[in-house]
Image: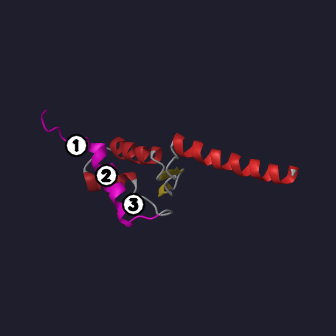
Amino acid sequence: MANTPEQPYLKVLNALRSAVDSGSLSPGDKYPSINELVKEHGVAPTTARRALTKLQEAGIAEPRHGIGWFVTVPPPPQATLEERVASLEVEVRELREQLDSRVS
């Protein structure tokens, strides 16, 4: 398989994600503007916008109309089905114990 070049939006996305991961950008900070990303990475505005949209889909960017894009707190990882079932089993057991103590 040939070494394929990185898609332009991934270059921008990876740079922005690295800035967040390293702490250069923190929740509440403003991402560079579309124009700044265009100049810095030599990409089209639609490419820069696509990178920000992908970050939004990942839960670490949100647009504010007329202001720009901002870093958000990433969502917590979703518990697996097994973890959720185990948690519910513990809750059910605790509720049964409470009911049993009231009935006695």
Magenta-highlighted residues: 1-26
Residue 2 in picture, x, y percent from top left: 12, 34
Residue 46 in picture, x, y percent from top left: 36, 41
Task: Name which residue type carries label 3.
Answer: Val
CB-based contact (under 8 Å), mark 3 and mark 1: no
46 vs 10, nearest the viewer: 10
Residue 81 in picture, x, y percent from top left: 53, 40
Sequence order check, earlier mark of 2 and 1: 1
- Residue tagged by mark 2? 14
Rounded to the nearest angstrom, the CA distance separating label 3 from label 2 is: 10 Å
Mark yes or no: residue 36 visible: no
Task: Answer with left or right where residue 42 lies relative to residue 72.
Answer: left
Mark number displayed over residue 6: 1
State the residue at coordinates (42%, 58%).
31
Indicate yes or no whether the magenta region holds residue 22.
yes
State the residue at coordinates (37%, 61%).
21
Residue neighbourhood size for the residue with mark 2, other residues' Cα within 10 Å, grouped as few (<14), some (14–19), many (≥20): few
29 vs 45, nearest the viewer: 29
Sequence order check, earlier mark of 3 and 1: 1
Mark 2 residue element: helix
Residue neighbourhood size for the residue with mark 1, other residues' Cα within 10 Å, grouped as few (<14), some (14–19), many (≥20): few
CB-based contact (under 8 Å), mark 2 and mark 1: yes
Task: Name which residue type carries label 2.
Answer: Asn
39 vs 29, nearest the viewer: 29
Task: Answer with left or right where residue 7 lies relative to residue 29.
Answer: left
Indicate yes or no whether the magenta region holds residue 50.
no
Mark number displayed over residue 20: 3
